[in-house]
Amino acid sequence: MEASGSCKGCKKEALIRDDVTGSLVCSSCGLVQPFDNYDPQLGGLNGPQGTFVRVGTTGTGSSLNYKDKKIFEAQKLIDDLLFKLGFSSEKSNEVRTMVATITEGEFGQGDWLPVLVGACSYVVRRQSNRALSIAEVGSVIGSDVYELGQMIRRVVEFLNLKLPDIDIVNSLELAFGQCGSLNRVSKDKVNKMLKQGTFLVQCAVKWFLTTGRRPLPMIAAILMFVAELNQVDVRIENIANEIHAGVATTRLRYKELSEALVKVAQALPWGKDVSTKNIIKNAPFVIQYMEMKSRLLPGKRRENLESGGFDLDGVVSDCLNKEFDYIPQGYDMENDSQYFEADSESGLDIDNSDKLKLSHECLSVIYSRFLNEDSRVNPVGENGGDHSRKRRREYDPPAMNEWWNGKSNMSKKLLLEQILEKDVGLDALPPSFVSGCLAYEQRREKINAAKLRISKIMYPSKANMGDTEEFSSEEHLHAKKKRRKTKKNGIDWEDFVIETLLLHHVKEDEIEKGHYNTLLDLHVFNSGCL
Protein backbone atom coordinates (compact mmCIF):
# COMPACT_ATOMS: atom_id res chain seq x y z
CA MET A 1 0.00 0.00 0.00
CA GLU A 2 1.51 3.19 -1.22
CA ALA A 3 1.37 6.38 0.81
CA SER A 4 1.90 9.99 -0.17
CA GLY A 5 5.07 11.76 0.74
CA SER A 6 8.77 11.42 0.03
CA CYS A 7 11.38 9.37 1.76
CA LYS A 8 13.50 11.11 4.38
CA GLY A 9 16.58 9.38 3.03
CA CYS A 10 16.48 9.15 -0.78
CA LYS A 11 13.77 11.75 -1.31
CA LYS A 12 11.83 9.44 -3.62
CA GLU A 13 8.07 9.04 -3.46
CA ALA A 14 8.16 5.29 -2.93
CA LEU A 15 6.69 4.97 0.56
CA ILE A 16 4.59 1.97 1.43
CA ARG A 17 3.02 0.92 4.76
CA ASP A 18 4.12 -2.33 6.27
CA ASP A 19 1.20 -4.64 7.02
CA VAL A 20 2.74 -6.03 10.20
CA THR A 21 4.12 -2.99 12.01
CA GLY A 22 2.00 -0.31 10.36
CA SER A 23 5.06 1.90 9.76
CA LEU A 24 5.96 3.67 6.55
CA VAL A 25 8.88 2.11 4.69
CA CYS A 26 10.66 3.35 1.57
CA SER A 27 10.49 0.64 -1.12
CA SER A 28 13.53 2.11 -2.84
CA CYS A 29 16.04 2.34 0.02
CA GLY A 30 14.15 0.44 2.78
CA LEU A 31 14.32 3.28 5.32
CA VAL A 32 11.64 3.24 8.02
CA GLN A 33 10.20 6.69 8.24
CA PRO A 34 10.45 8.23 11.76
CA PHE A 35 7.58 9.86 13.78
CA ASP A 36 4.91 8.33 11.63
CA ASN A 37 3.43 5.78 14.07
CA TYR A 38 0.83 8.02 15.80
CA ASP A 39 -2.28 6.00 16.60
CA PRO A 40 -5.21 8.17 17.72
CA GLN A 41 -7.39 6.68 20.51
CA LEU A 42 -11.06 6.70 19.67
CA GLY A 43 -14.11 5.37 21.44
CA GLY A 44 -14.24 7.59 24.61
CA LEU A 45 -13.88 6.07 28.07
CA ASN A 46 -14.71 2.58 26.82
CA GLY A 47 -12.20 2.72 23.97
CA PRO A 48 -8.61 1.44 23.96
CA GLN A 49 -6.24 2.89 26.60
CA GLY A 50 -3.37 5.18 25.76
CA THR A 51 0.29 4.43 26.14
CA PHE A 52 1.32 6.79 28.97
CA VAL A 53 -1.93 8.04 30.59
CA ARG A 54 -4.32 5.54 32.11
CA VAL A 55 -7.76 6.13 33.61
CA GLY A 56 -7.94 6.15 37.49
CA THR A 57 -4.21 6.06 38.22
CA THR A 58 -3.59 9.77 39.01
CA GLY A 59 -1.77 10.26 42.40
CA THR A 60 -0.77 6.65 42.90
CA GLY A 61 2.70 5.30 43.01
CA SER A 62 5.27 7.68 44.60
CA SER A 63 2.71 10.51 45.17
CA LEU A 64 0.48 10.63 48.24
CA ASN A 65 -3.25 10.64 47.95
CA TYR A 66 -4.71 14.12 48.53
CA LYS A 67 -6.87 13.02 51.47
CA ASP A 68 -4.02 11.21 53.17
CA LYS A 69 -1.74 14.20 52.68
CA LYS A 70 -4.37 16.54 54.09
CA ILE A 71 -4.80 14.41 57.22
CA PHE A 72 -1.04 14.08 57.61
CA GLU A 73 -0.50 17.84 57.47
CA ALA A 74 -3.39 18.48 59.89
CA GLN A 75 -2.04 15.96 62.40
CA LYS A 76 1.39 17.55 62.16
CA LEU A 77 -0.09 20.99 62.86
CA ILE A 78 -2.09 19.69 65.83
CA ASP A 79 0.96 18.03 67.36
CA ASP A 80 2.99 21.20 66.99
CA LEU A 81 0.35 23.43 68.64
CA LEU A 82 -0.29 21.00 71.49
CA PHE A 83 3.44 20.76 72.18
CA LYS A 84 3.64 24.56 72.47
CA LEU A 85 0.65 24.55 74.85
CA GLY A 86 2.30 21.90 77.01
CA PHE A 87 -0.40 19.24 76.69
CA SER A 88 0.15 15.71 77.93
CA SER A 89 -0.36 12.72 75.65
CA GLU A 90 -3.76 12.00 77.20
CA LYS A 91 -5.05 15.53 76.72
CA SER A 92 -3.58 15.64 73.23
CA ASN A 93 -5.58 12.57 72.26
CA GLU A 94 -8.74 14.24 73.59
CA VAL A 95 -8.07 17.29 71.42
CA ARG A 96 -7.47 15.16 68.33
CA THR A 97 -10.65 13.20 68.94
CA MET A 98 -12.63 16.44 69.34
CA VAL A 99 -11.22 17.92 66.12
CA ALA A 100 -11.93 14.65 64.24
CA THR A 101 -15.51 14.62 65.56
CA ILE A 102 -16.18 18.19 64.48
CA THR A 103 -14.64 17.75 61.01
CA GLU A 104 -16.11 14.24 60.58
CA GLY A 105 -12.63 12.77 60.16
CA GLU A 106 -11.75 15.03 57.23
CA PHE A 107 -9.64 17.52 59.26
CA GLY A 108 -8.71 20.10 56.64
CA GLN A 109 -6.29 22.87 55.80
CA GLY A 110 -6.47 26.62 56.00
CA ASP A 111 -6.26 29.49 58.48
CA TRP A 112 -9.33 28.21 60.35
CA LEU A 113 -7.70 24.94 61.43
CA PRO A 114 -5.31 26.45 64.06
CA VAL A 115 -8.23 28.42 65.50
CA LEU A 116 -10.30 25.23 65.77
CA VAL A 117 -7.41 23.38 67.42
CA GLY A 118 -6.95 26.24 69.90
CA ALA A 119 -10.68 26.27 70.72
CA CYS A 120 -10.71 22.51 71.30
CA SER A 121 -7.60 22.80 73.47
CA TYR A 122 -9.26 25.46 75.60
CA VAL A 123 -12.42 23.37 75.97
CA VAL A 124 -10.47 20.25 77.00
CA ARG A 125 -8.51 22.12 79.65
CA ARG A 126 -11.63 23.91 80.85
CA GLN A 127 -13.41 20.59 81.33
CA SER A 128 -10.58 19.39 83.57
CA ASN A 129 -10.80 22.55 85.74
CA ARG A 130 -7.32 23.58 84.64
CA ALA A 131 -8.41 26.24 82.21
CA LEU A 132 -5.97 28.06 79.98
CA SER A 133 -6.54 31.71 79.31
CA ILE A 134 -7.91 32.62 75.90
CA ALA A 135 -5.15 35.20 75.57
CA GLU A 136 -2.48 32.54 76.12
CA VAL A 137 -4.02 30.18 73.55
CA GLY A 138 -4.39 33.07 71.10
CA SER A 139 -0.72 34.01 71.46
CA VAL A 140 0.33 30.43 70.67
CA ILE A 141 -1.89 29.91 67.63
CA GLY A 142 -1.50 33.49 66.39
CA SER A 143 -5.20 34.33 66.54
CA ASP A 144 -7.23 37.22 67.86
CA VAL A 145 -8.94 36.57 71.19
CA TYR A 146 -12.33 37.56 69.83
CA GLU A 147 -12.06 35.21 66.85
CA LEU A 148 -10.93 32.44 69.19
CA GLY A 149 -13.80 33.18 71.56
CA GLN A 150 -16.32 32.85 68.75
CA MET A 151 -14.82 29.52 67.73
CA ILE A 152 -15.01 28.28 71.32
CA ARG A 153 -18.68 29.18 71.45
CA ARG A 154 -19.32 27.31 68.19
CA VAL A 155 -17.46 24.22 69.45
CA VAL A 156 -19.46 24.19 72.69
CA GLU A 157 -22.75 24.55 70.84
CA PHE A 158 -21.89 21.92 68.22
CA LEU A 159 -20.86 19.31 70.81
CA ASN A 160 -23.65 20.36 73.21
CA LEU A 161 -21.22 20.81 76.10
CA LYS A 162 -21.61 22.63 79.41
CA LEU A 163 -18.35 24.08 80.59
CA PRO A 164 -17.70 24.41 84.34
CA ASP A 165 -17.12 27.80 85.90
CA ILE A 166 -13.58 29.13 85.91
CA ASP A 167 -11.74 28.23 89.11
CA ILE A 168 -9.85 31.40 89.93
CA VAL A 169 -7.72 29.65 92.56
CA ASN A 170 -6.46 27.16 89.97
CA SER A 171 -5.81 30.06 87.63
CA LEU A 172 -3.76 31.70 90.39
CA GLU A 173 -1.71 28.52 90.82
CA LEU A 174 -1.07 28.37 87.07
CA ALA A 175 -0.05 32.04 87.11
CA PHE A 176 2.52 31.36 89.82
CA GLY A 177 3.98 28.62 87.64
CA GLN A 178 4.04 30.78 84.51
CA CYS A 179 5.51 33.89 86.14
CA GLY A 180 9.19 33.88 85.29
CA SER A 181 9.87 36.77 87.68
CA LEU A 182 9.50 34.34 90.60
CA ASN A 183 12.10 31.86 89.36
CA ARG A 184 14.79 33.31 91.60
CA VAL A 185 12.56 33.14 94.70
CA SER A 186 12.91 30.16 97.02
CA LYS A 187 10.30 27.44 96.87
CA ASP A 188 9.22 27.93 100.49
CA LYS A 189 8.60 31.62 99.94
CA VAL A 190 6.67 30.93 96.74
CA ASN A 191 4.44 28.45 98.59
CA LYS A 192 3.81 31.05 101.30
CA MET A 193 3.05 33.69 98.68
CA LEU A 194 0.65 31.27 97.02
CA LYS A 195 -1.29 30.85 100.28
CA GLN A 196 -1.40 34.59 100.78
CA GLY A 197 -2.55 35.07 97.20
CA THR A 198 -5.25 32.42 97.66
CA PHE A 199 -6.48 34.28 100.74
CA LEU A 200 -6.59 37.61 98.90
CA VAL A 201 -8.13 36.26 95.70
CA GLN A 202 -11.00 34.69 97.64
CA CYS A 203 -11.44 37.95 99.52
CA ALA A 204 -11.64 39.65 96.12
CA VAL A 205 -14.35 37.16 95.13
CA LYS A 206 -16.29 38.04 98.29
CA TRP A 207 -15.92 41.75 97.50
CA PHE A 208 -17.21 41.16 93.93
CA LEU A 209 -13.98 42.48 92.41
CA THR A 210 -13.94 39.55 89.98
CA THR A 211 -17.66 39.43 89.13
CA GLY A 212 -18.28 39.83 85.40
CA ARG A 213 -14.63 40.54 84.72
CA ARG A 214 -11.66 38.77 83.23
CA PRO A 215 -9.82 36.98 86.02
CA LEU A 216 -6.24 37.41 84.79
CA PRO A 217 -5.83 41.14 85.61
CA MET A 218 -6.98 40.54 89.19
CA ILE A 219 -4.65 37.54 89.47
CA ALA A 220 -1.75 39.66 88.21
CA ALA A 221 -2.63 42.43 90.69
CA ILE A 222 -2.73 39.99 93.62
CA LEU A 223 0.53 38.40 92.52
CA MET A 224 2.12 41.85 92.46
CA PHE A 225 0.69 42.69 95.89
CA VAL A 226 2.01 39.56 97.62
CA ALA A 227 5.36 40.04 95.88
CA GLU A 228 5.64 43.49 97.44
CA LEU A 229 4.63 42.07 100.81
CA ASN A 230 7.46 39.56 100.58
CA GLN A 231 9.96 42.14 99.29
CA VAL A 232 10.32 40.47 95.91
CA ASP A 233 11.57 42.94 93.33
CA VAL A 234 9.20 42.63 90.38
CA ARG A 235 7.36 45.02 88.09
CA ILE A 236 3.67 44.94 87.42
CA GLU A 237 4.25 45.22 83.67
CA ASN A 238 6.39 42.09 83.63
CA ILE A 239 3.86 40.08 85.64
CA ALA A 240 0.97 41.17 83.43
CA ASN A 241 2.84 40.31 80.22
CA GLU A 242 4.00 36.93 81.52
CA ILE A 243 0.48 35.74 82.32
CA HIS A 244 -1.10 37.49 79.29
CA ALA A 245 -3.08 40.11 81.26
CA GLY A 246 -3.66 43.71 80.22
CA VAL A 247 -1.26 46.08 81.95
CA ALA A 248 -3.71 48.97 82.28
CA THR A 249 -6.46 46.70 83.61
CA THR A 250 -4.01 45.10 86.03
CA ARG A 251 -3.14 48.52 87.44
CA LEU A 252 -6.83 49.27 87.90
CA ARG A 253 -7.43 45.96 89.73
CA TYR A 254 -4.41 46.65 91.94
CA LYS A 255 -5.90 50.02 92.87
CA GLU A 256 -9.30 48.43 93.63
CA LEU A 257 -7.67 45.78 95.81
CA SER A 258 -5.70 48.41 97.72
CA GLU A 259 -8.81 50.52 98.26
CA ALA A 260 -10.71 47.51 99.61
CA LEU A 261 -7.90 46.74 102.08
CA VAL A 262 -7.88 50.38 103.17
CA LYS A 263 -11.60 50.09 103.95
CA VAL A 264 -10.91 46.99 106.03
CA ALA A 265 -8.14 48.85 107.89
CA GLN A 266 -10.60 51.50 109.07
CA ALA A 267 -11.75 49.08 111.79
CA LEU A 268 -8.28 49.23 113.37
CA PRO A 269 -7.46 52.00 115.86
CA TRP A 270 -4.96 53.58 113.46
CA GLY A 271 -7.15 52.97 110.42
CA LYS A 272 -7.63 56.67 109.65
CA ASP A 273 -3.90 56.91 108.90
CA VAL A 274 -3.97 54.01 106.41
CA SER A 275 -4.18 54.95 102.75
CA THR A 276 -3.41 53.37 99.39
CA LYS A 277 0.09 54.85 99.58
CA ASN A 278 1.06 53.03 102.77
CA ILE A 279 -1.21 50.00 102.53
CA ILE A 280 1.77 47.73 101.80
CA LYS A 281 3.33 48.62 105.17
CA ASN A 282 0.04 48.14 106.99
CA ALA A 283 -1.07 45.09 105.00
CA PRO A 284 0.50 42.52 107.39
CA PHE A 285 -1.64 43.80 110.25
CA VAL A 286 -4.72 44.24 108.07
CA ILE A 287 -4.45 40.70 106.71
CA GLN A 288 -3.84 39.36 110.21
CA TYR A 289 -7.02 41.12 111.31
CA MET A 290 -8.89 39.67 108.33
CA GLU A 291 -7.64 36.19 109.20
CA MET A 292 -8.93 36.62 112.73
CA LYS A 293 -12.34 37.72 111.47
CA SER A 294 -12.59 34.82 109.01
CA ARG A 295 -11.86 32.26 111.73
CA LEU A 296 -14.61 33.49 114.05
CA LEU A 297 -17.96 31.75 113.93
CA PRO A 298 -20.94 33.87 112.81
CA GLY A 299 -22.49 33.85 116.29
CA LYS A 300 -19.29 34.68 118.17
CA ARG A 301 -18.17 38.03 116.82
CA ARG A 302 -17.16 39.35 120.25
CA GLU A 303 -15.13 36.31 121.20
CA ASN A 304 -11.73 36.85 122.77
CA LEU A 305 -9.37 37.99 120.04
CA GLU A 306 -6.63 35.64 121.11
CA SER A 307 -8.92 32.68 120.45
CA GLY A 308 -9.11 33.78 116.83
CA GLY A 309 -5.33 33.63 116.48
CA PHE A 310 -4.84 37.42 116.40
CA ASP A 311 -2.26 38.77 118.86
CA LEU A 312 -3.70 42.25 119.17
CA ASP A 313 -1.30 43.08 122.01
CA GLY A 314 1.69 42.50 119.80
CA VAL A 315 0.11 44.07 116.74
CA VAL A 316 -0.55 47.39 118.45
CA SER A 317 2.85 47.37 120.12
CA ASP A 318 4.59 46.66 116.81
CA CYS A 319 2.52 49.29 115.07
CA LEU A 320 3.38 51.94 117.66
CA ASN A 321 7.05 51.04 117.38
CA LYS A 322 7.40 50.53 113.60
CA GLU A 323 4.48 51.41 111.44
CA PHE A 324 4.45 55.22 111.31
CA ASP A 325 5.51 56.58 107.96
CA TYR A 326 6.45 60.03 109.25
CA ILE A 327 7.72 61.18 112.65
CA PRO A 328 9.19 64.51 113.81
CA GLN A 329 12.92 64.80 113.93
CA GLY A 330 14.53 64.41 117.29
CA TYR A 331 11.76 62.31 118.76
CA ASP A 332 12.78 59.26 120.75
CA MET A 333 10.68 56.20 119.88
CA GLU A 334 12.47 53.75 122.13
CA ASN A 335 9.60 53.28 124.55
CA ASP A 336 6.47 53.75 122.43
CA SER A 337 5.00 50.55 123.78
CA GLN A 338 4.40 52.24 127.11
CA TYR A 339 1.14 53.52 125.63
CA PHE A 340 -0.07 49.96 125.41
CA GLU A 341 0.66 49.37 129.07
CA ALA A 342 -2.14 49.72 131.62
CA ASP A 343 -2.21 52.25 134.42
CA SER A 344 -4.65 53.36 137.06
CA GLU A 345 -6.39 55.82 134.73
CA SER A 346 -7.11 53.42 131.91
CA GLY A 347 -8.65 50.80 134.17
CA LEU A 348 -7.01 47.88 132.40
CA ASP A 349 -5.81 44.94 134.48
CA ILE A 350 -2.85 43.48 132.65
CA ASP A 351 -2.23 40.94 135.40
CA ASN A 352 -5.20 39.01 134.11
CA SER A 353 -4.27 39.43 130.47
CA ASP A 354 -5.48 35.97 129.45
CA LYS A 355 -9.07 37.03 130.06
CA LEU A 356 -8.66 40.56 128.76
CA LYS A 357 -11.00 41.63 125.99
CA LEU A 358 -9.83 44.80 124.26
CA SER A 359 -12.42 46.79 122.38
CA HIS A 360 -11.77 49.13 119.52
CA GLU A 361 -12.82 52.06 121.73
CA CYS A 362 -10.12 51.23 124.30
CA LEU A 363 -7.48 50.95 121.60
CA SER A 364 -8.59 54.26 120.13
CA VAL A 365 -8.06 55.96 123.53
CA ILE A 366 -4.55 54.50 123.78
CA TYR A 367 -3.74 55.53 120.25
CA SER A 368 -5.10 59.06 120.81
CA ARG A 369 -2.87 59.46 123.86
CA PHE A 370 0.10 58.50 121.75
CA LEU A 371 -0.78 61.05 119.09
CA ASN A 372 -1.34 63.80 121.69
CA GLU A 373 2.08 63.30 123.25
CA ASP A 374 3.60 62.96 119.79
CA SER A 375 2.18 66.36 118.82
CA ARG A 376 3.76 68.03 121.88
CA VAL A 377 7.30 67.17 120.74
CA ASN A 378 9.25 70.29 119.83
CA PRO A 379 10.49 69.83 116.27
CA VAL A 380 13.52 72.10 116.69
CA GLY A 381 16.89 70.89 115.47
CA GLU A 382 20.28 71.24 117.05
CA ASN A 383 21.02 74.49 115.22
CA GLY A 384 17.86 76.14 116.48
CA GLY A 385 16.12 75.92 113.14
CA ASP A 386 12.48 75.06 112.89
CA HIS A 387 12.35 71.71 111.15
CA SER A 388 8.60 71.59 110.78
CA ARG A 389 8.91 69.28 107.82
CA LYS A 390 8.83 65.64 108.84
CA ARG A 391 11.41 63.24 107.65
CA ARG A 392 10.47 59.82 106.41
CA ARG A 393 11.36 57.09 108.83
CA GLU A 394 13.23 54.06 107.62
CA TYR A 395 10.76 51.22 107.42
CA ASP A 396 11.76 47.74 108.45
CA PRO A 397 8.84 45.48 107.53
CA PRO A 398 8.20 42.57 109.85
CA ALA A 399 9.45 39.17 108.86
CA MET A 400 6.93 36.88 107.25
CA ASN A 401 6.91 34.41 110.12
CA GLU A 402 5.95 37.20 112.52
CA TRP A 403 2.50 37.81 111.13
CA TRP A 404 1.48 35.14 108.61
CA ASN A 405 0.38 31.74 109.85
CA GLY A 406 -2.08 30.66 107.17
CA LYS A 407 -4.44 29.01 109.64
CA SER A 408 -7.56 30.53 108.10
CA ASN A 409 -9.65 28.38 105.77
CA MET A 410 -9.53 31.26 103.30
CA SER A 411 -5.95 30.20 102.53
CA LYS A 412 -7.40 27.04 100.99
CA LYS A 413 -9.69 26.67 98.02
CA LEU A 414 -13.32 27.09 99.11
CA LEU A 415 -16.65 26.94 97.37
CA LEU A 416 -18.40 30.17 96.49
CA GLU A 417 -21.04 29.63 99.18
CA GLN A 418 -18.35 29.14 101.81
CA ILE A 419 -16.51 32.29 100.70
CA LEU A 420 -19.63 34.42 100.93
CA GLU A 421 -20.35 33.14 104.44
CA LYS A 422 -16.95 34.23 105.73
CA ASP A 423 -16.43 37.56 107.47
CA VAL A 424 -13.21 39.30 106.47
CA GLY A 425 -14.02 42.72 107.87
CA LEU A 426 -15.76 44.18 104.82
CA ASP A 427 -19.04 43.56 103.01
CA ALA A 428 -18.77 45.36 99.69
CA LEU A 429 -21.11 45.77 96.75
CA PRO A 430 -20.05 45.10 93.15
CA PRO A 431 -18.09 48.10 91.80
CA SER A 432 -20.18 48.16 88.63
CA PHE A 433 -23.37 48.35 90.69
CA VAL A 434 -21.98 51.18 92.82
CA SER A 435 -20.80 53.14 89.78
CA GLY A 436 -24.16 52.58 88.10
CA CYS A 437 -26.01 53.93 91.13
CA LEU A 438 -23.76 56.97 91.23
CA ALA A 439 -24.32 57.57 87.52
CA TYR A 440 -28.08 57.38 88.04
CA GLU A 441 -27.86 59.90 90.87
CA GLN A 442 -25.77 62.28 88.80
CA ARG A 443 -28.17 62.07 85.87
CA ARG A 444 -31.10 62.64 88.23
CA GLU A 445 -29.41 65.81 89.52
CA LYS A 446 -28.79 66.97 85.96
CA ILE A 447 -32.45 66.32 85.09
CA ASN A 448 -33.65 68.38 88.07
CA ALA A 449 -31.27 71.20 87.19
CA ALA A 450 -32.39 71.12 83.55
CA LYS A 451 -36.03 71.27 84.59
CA LEU A 452 -35.25 74.28 86.77
CA ARG A 453 -33.50 76.09 83.93
CA ILE A 454 -36.35 75.36 81.53
CA SER A 455 -38.86 76.60 84.09
CA LYS A 456 -36.92 79.86 84.58
CA ILE A 457 -36.88 80.50 80.83
CA MET A 458 -40.51 79.55 80.14
CA TYR A 459 -41.93 81.20 83.27
CA PRO A 460 -39.60 84.10 84.15
CA SER A 461 -42.15 85.71 86.46
CA LYS A 462 -42.07 82.65 88.75
CA ALA A 463 -38.31 82.36 88.75
CA ASN A 464 -36.35 83.43 91.79
CA MET A 465 -34.31 86.46 90.83
CA GLY A 466 -31.70 85.73 93.46
CA ASP A 467 -30.25 82.66 91.81
CA THR A 468 -30.85 83.20 88.12
CA GLU A 469 -28.37 81.96 85.55
CA GLU A 470 -27.45 83.69 82.35
CA PHE A 471 -27.59 81.68 79.18
CA SER A 472 -26.30 82.79 75.83
CA SER A 473 -27.18 81.44 72.46
CA GLU A 474 -23.47 80.92 71.77
CA GLU A 475 -23.43 78.16 74.39
CA HIS A 476 -26.09 76.27 72.47
CA LEU A 477 -24.39 76.89 69.15
CA HIS A 478 -20.98 75.71 70.34
CA ALA A 479 -22.17 72.94 72.66
CA LYS A 480 -21.10 70.34 70.11
CA LYS A 481 -17.52 71.66 70.18
CA LYS A 482 -17.25 71.66 73.96
CA ARG A 483 -17.95 67.96 74.43
CA ARG A 484 -17.27 66.49 77.84
CA LYS A 485 -14.26 68.42 79.09
CA THR A 486 -15.36 72.00 78.47
CA LYS A 487 -17.89 73.55 80.80
CA LYS A 488 -19.27 77.05 81.10
CA ASN A 489 -21.34 78.13 84.08
CA GLY A 490 -21.37 74.49 85.21
CA ILE A 491 -23.18 73.28 82.08
CA ASP A 492 -21.74 70.75 79.66
CA TRP A 493 -22.92 68.89 76.58
CA GLU A 494 -24.87 66.35 78.66
CA ASP A 495 -26.98 69.12 80.19
CA PHE A 496 -27.94 70.40 76.75
CA VAL A 497 -28.88 66.89 75.60
CA ILE A 498 -31.04 66.39 78.69
CA GLU A 499 -32.74 69.76 78.12
CA THR A 500 -33.48 68.80 74.51
CA LEU A 501 -34.97 65.46 75.55
CA LEU A 502 -37.11 67.07 78.24
CA LEU A 503 -38.42 69.61 75.73
CA HIS A 504 -39.41 66.71 73.48
CA HIS A 505 -41.39 65.16 76.37
CA VAL A 506 -39.14 62.16 76.88
CA LYS A 507 -39.81 60.29 80.13
CA GLU A 508 -37.38 61.03 82.91
CA ASP A 509 -36.83 57.36 83.81
CA GLU A 510 -35.65 56.76 80.23
CA ILE A 511 -33.25 59.70 80.41
CA GLU A 512 -31.82 58.33 83.66
CA LYS A 513 -30.58 55.25 81.80
CA GLY A 514 -28.18 57.42 79.80
CA HIS A 515 -28.88 56.07 76.29
CA TYR A 516 -28.77 59.56 74.79
CA ASN A 517 -28.05 58.65 71.15
CA THR A 518 -30.96 56.23 70.99
CA LEU A 519 -33.34 58.71 72.60
CA LEU A 520 -32.22 61.49 70.25
CA ASP A 521 -32.79 59.25 67.23
CA LEU A 522 -36.24 58.22 68.44
CA HIS A 523 -37.64 61.49 69.77
CA VAL A 524 -35.66 64.34 68.18
CA PHE A 525 -34.29 63.57 64.74
CA ASN A 526 -37.18 61.29 63.70
CA SER A 527 -39.90 63.30 65.40
CA GLY A 528 -41.15 64.70 62.08
CA CYS A 529 -41.62 61.21 60.62
CA LEU A 530 -43.73 59.89 63.48
Image (tube, grey):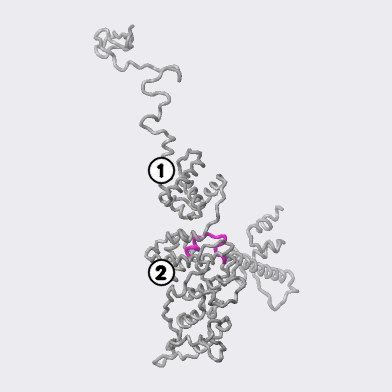
Of 337 and 84, the residue lying toward us: 337
Residue 482 visible in this rendered orientation of the protein: no
Task: Determine the secondary structure under disc 1.
Answer: helix
Q: Residue at x 47, y 72 (%)?
A: 404
Identified by mark 1, the residue type is Lys
Q: Position of residue 306 (x, y in %)?
A: 53, 77
N-terminal of the two: label 1 or label 2? 1
Q: Residue at x 55, y 54 (%)?
A: 164
**What range is drawn magenta here?**
206-221
Question: What's the CA distance linking mark 1 and mark 2?
Answer: 42 Å
Q: Residues within 10 Å of mark 1 (few under 14, many from 20)?
A: few
Q: Which residue is mark 2?
A: 232
The numbered disc on residue 76 is 1
Q: Residue furthest top?
A: 1
Q: Is residue 269 left or right of residue 325?
A: right
Name which quarter of the figure residue 504 lies in: bottom right
Could you tell me which quadrant the N terminus lies in?
Answer: top left
405 part of magenta stretch = no
Residue 290 visible in this rendered orientation of the protein: yes
Identified by mark 2, the residue type is Val
Figure check: 354 above or below 407: below
Name which quarter of the figure residue 499 lies in: bottom right
Q: Position of residue 407 (x, y in %)?
A: 50, 69
Figure check: 129 above or below 463: above
Task: Determine the secondary structure under disc 2.
Answer: loop
Of 158 and 292, the residue lying toward us: 292
Q: Marks 1 and 2: CB-CB under 8 Å?
A: no
Q: Residue furthest bottom?
A: 384
Q: Residue at x 51, y 50 (%)?
A: 123
